Amino acid sequence: MKRTDSILRAALAIALGTGALLPLDAQSKDPKKDPDQIGNRDVGKGVNFYSLEKEMALGKQLAQEVEREAKLVDDPIPAEFINRLAQNLARNSDIKVPVTAKMIDSDQVNAFALPGGFLFVNTGLVMKAETEAELAGAIAHEIAHIAARHGTRQASRGQIVDIASLPLIFLGGWPGFAVRQGAGLALPLTFLKFSRGFEQEADLLGLQYLYKAGYDPTAFIDFFERIEALEKKKPGTASELFRSHPKTATRIQYAQTNVQELLQQQPQYVVTTSEFIEVKRQLERNMGRRKAAPSNTGPTLRRSTSLSYS
């Protein structure tokens, strides 16, 4: 019986892609830790009941739900900037699907990726970043979730563990519940909240994508240190999903180790650009106009001076 249990545990470890049973020398040659292999490696390998085509269709469906419920930024300057930034990072990643990035008008510090290449960034995240490299680091992390297909792999893991949900696999459904996010979004939690292992992998890959795109990789560390400080000072600054990432101290140490061991020092990096500065100014102007605008809670009345009543 014990032998059977051992076999089952071993099979589950292999199915979930933990790598726990691999020899140490095999783990040390992990292509995910080689930035020179970006674009030539399959970082999305693992149990997945969704084909790439179904994943893209699912992501499109979820993205349409976001766009119905959230207020998107329609100002072309910040909207186009965020999409170009995401496209640049995607070109320097392992992603195998087209990327569409849009900005949500929300003060909450958050960004999230949906399966199949759909990415949303809150204005609050842009405003809290001090440099373009910091913003790029946060977006690179989300692009890594897409490249590694974490959304549908997470859902597939849930289906393996929950035997009662197995019929859903063949009916095309998925487990998980609708949750309300800071921007008023109702989306399946399964595709938004990842395991600690997936979050760590997204940090590993995102750091490499940031570096490959020419940005200062230490900005990745700087930004999350700032978010941690802001969250301690004013709880609720970052969204619940953003705070659900691994503990910041552990995360920073992991990122520092990866910078030292995996990335070669370059003579120069992009830290920020005039375009990023202009985008923040534009968002500040938009916020100022909203605050100055009268509250639209009822009819606007004008007192007449030509008539009097007694």
Image (cartoon, grey):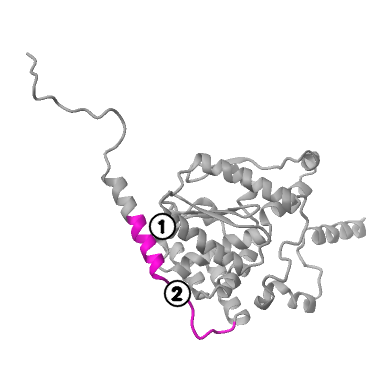
Residue in view at x 80 percent, y 39 percent: 167
Residue in view at x 78 percent, y 43 percent: 169
Q: Position of residue 282 (x, y in %)?
A: 35, 57
The amino acid beneath tag 2 is Val
Residue that mark 1 sits on: 77
Q: Which mark is residue 271?
A: 2
User: Relative to the observer, which residue lies in front, 189 or 230?
Assistant: 189
Q: Position of residue 138 (x, y in %)?
A: 52, 63
In the rendered structure, the answer to whether residue 271 lies left or right of residue 291 reads right
Q: Residues within 10 Å of mark 2 (few under 14, many from 20)?
A: some
CA gap between label 2 and label 1 equals 20 Å
Write down the region rendered in magenta. 264-284
Q: Position of residue 99 (x, y in %)?
A: 60, 57
The amino acid beneath tag 1 is Ile
| SS at mark 2 in the image | loop
Identify the image quadrant of residue 227. bottom left
Marked residue nearer the N-terminal end (2 or 1): 1
| Figure check: 67 above or below 133 | above
In the rendered structure, the answer to whether residue 200 lies left or right of residue 160 reads left
